[in-house]
Image: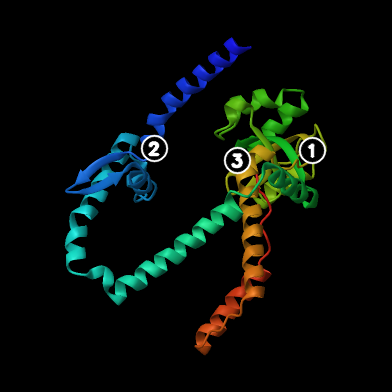
Amino acid sequence: MLRYNKIAAAVIVATLGLQLPAFAQEDAVVAKVGDLEIHQSELDLAIANLDPQLAQLPDEQKKVAALSSIIDVKLLVKSADAEGLKDTDDFKKRVSFITDRELHNAYFRKHVSDAVTPEEVKARYDKEVSALPEEEEVHARHILVPTEEDAKAVIKQLDEGKDFAEIAKEKSTDSNKDDGGDLGWFGKGRMVPEFEEAAFGLEKGAYTKTPVKSQFGFHVIKLEDKRVAPPPPFEQVEQQVRQMVMRDKYVALIEKAKADQKIDIMDEALKTGYDEVNKEQEAQPQAQPQP
C-alpha cells in the first residue's frame, strides 16, 4: 500500500511538473514594441476581428496580418498617452460605448449562444416540422423537343411501348437527357405553370397524351411517383433552427429587461420610430426551416 502511494505521488508530481510551463505560457508574450508587450491573447483577439477579406487568408498569413495591426497600434500608444488623449471626453465616451457593446456581447454569448443545448434545437425542429402543412411532391421525367410534331412523334413511340428514358436520351434537347429526362422530386411552384399543371394531373406511371407547350418548347411528361413532401432532414437545417432558438432566448432576455427597466425617449420622432420598429418585430412571423 505504501509503495503504491509513493508511486502515485511521484506520478502527480511529474504531471504537475509537466503542466507548470503550460500555465506559465498560457498568455505568452509573442512580441514587444519598446517596453510594451503583445500577448497571445491580444493576437487571438486581433485574428478574430480581422477584416472579412483578410480573414480568408491562410492561418499563418492571418497571424502575420493580425500581429502587424497590433504593432501599428502599439507604436502610437505612447504618443497618444503623452498627448493625454485617453483623458479627453471624446475618448471616454468612445470607451464607454465600446465597453457597453462588449458587455452586451459577453452577456449574449453566456445566456444565448453558449446556452443553447442540442436538446433545445432538436425539440424546436420537431415542433416546427409538426406544424408544417402537408405538400404534395411528384417525381417526373420529361422529353423536351422543339416542335409539336416532334412531341407527337414521341408520344406515338411511347404508345407503341418504347421506353421513356431511352427516347429521352435519344431525342430530348434538355440538359438532363443523359439521365433519361429525370427531374427528380419537386413540389408546386418549382416549374413553369403549364408544366406543373400537366405533371401534377397525371396518375403514377402515366405520360401526357398531348404535347405540353412552354416557353422552352414542347414537353412529353411521365409521372414516376407521388408523395407527401418529407420535412428537411435535421442535419440540413440544424444551424437554421439553432438561430431560431437563439432568437427566442434573446427576445426573452430583452423583454424581461424592458419589463424591469423604464425606457424614456425624449425626442418624439425617435420615440415614434422606435415604437414602430418594435411593433414590426413583434408582428414578424418566425421563419420555418427550409430545405
x, y percent for residue 223: 76, 35
* Residue 133 in view in this figure: no
Residue 198, located in which quarter of the rendered image?
Answer: top right
Which numbered mark, 2 or 3, is in the foreground of this view?
2
26 is higher (above) or lower (below) than 262: above
| Residue placed furthest toward the front | 2
Residue 26, located in which quarter of the rendered image?
Answer: top left
Q: Which colour style is shown?
A: rainbow
- For the N terminus, the image quarter is top right
Element carrying mark 2: loop
99 is higher (above) or lower (below) than 232: below
Earlier residue among tags 2 and 3: 2
x, y percent for residue 63: 30, 40
Front-lying residue, 179 or 164: 179
Front-lying residue, 172 or 245: 245
x, y percent for residue 158: 74, 28
User: What residue appears at the point 45 percent right and 20 percent down from the top-left corner?
Assistant: 14
Residue 252, located in which quarter of the rendered image?
Answer: bottom right
Q: Amino acid at mark 1?
A: Lys
To which residue does mark 3 refer? 147
Q: Are marks 2 and 3 in contact (CB under 8 Å)?
A: no
* Residue 245 in view in this figure: yes
Earlier residue among tags 3 and 1: 3
Q: Which mark is residue 26?
A: 2
Which numbered mark, 2 or 1, is in the foreground of this view?
2
